[in-house]
Image (tube, rainbow, N blue to C red):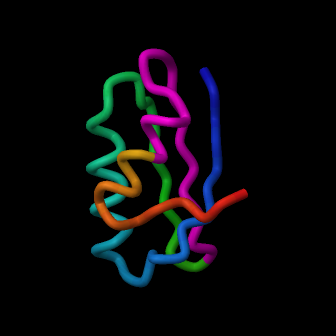
Amino acid sequence: MLTVTYSVPNISCGHCVHTIKSEVASLTGVQRVEADLATKKVTIQFDAPATEQTLRARLAEINYPAAAN
């Protein structure tokens, strides 16, 4: 299992946190999603077939793009 943490500047409320958690968790291979309003960070634990590319793509699709590293 892999774990990644992304900075997501668009997180501004509890609804944002809920949306990110539910949308990213729906991806096959995603085991756990944590979104933190205070730090504006999203931590995701995942296995194949999910990849960092699919995670970043889903965040962008739902208007919460991860900041460039």
Q: Residue furthest bottom?
A: 12
Q: Nearer the viewer, residue 44 or 59?
A: 59
The verdict on residue 40 being magenta is yes
Q: Using residue 7 as the reference point, say whether residue 28 is left or right of it.
A: left
Query: Magenta stretch?
Result: 39-56
Q: Using residue 59 as the reference point, say whether residue 26 is left or right of it.
A: left
Q: Quadrant of the C terminus?
A: bottom right
* Quarter-of-image position of residue 20: bottom left
| Residue 45 percent location from the top left of the image | 54, 34
Question: Which residue is depicted at the point 36% across and 47% down?
Answer: 58
The verdict on residue 47 being magenta is yes
| Residue 8 percent location from the top left of the image | 54, 67
Question: Which residue is depicted at the point 44% across and 25% down?
Answer: 50
Q: Decide: is 69 above or below 33.
A: below
Q: Nearer the viewer, residue 46 or 66?
A: 66
| Residue 17 percent location from the top left of the image | 38, 67
Q: Nearer the viewer, residue 34 or 53?
A: 53
Q: Residue furthest right?
A: 69
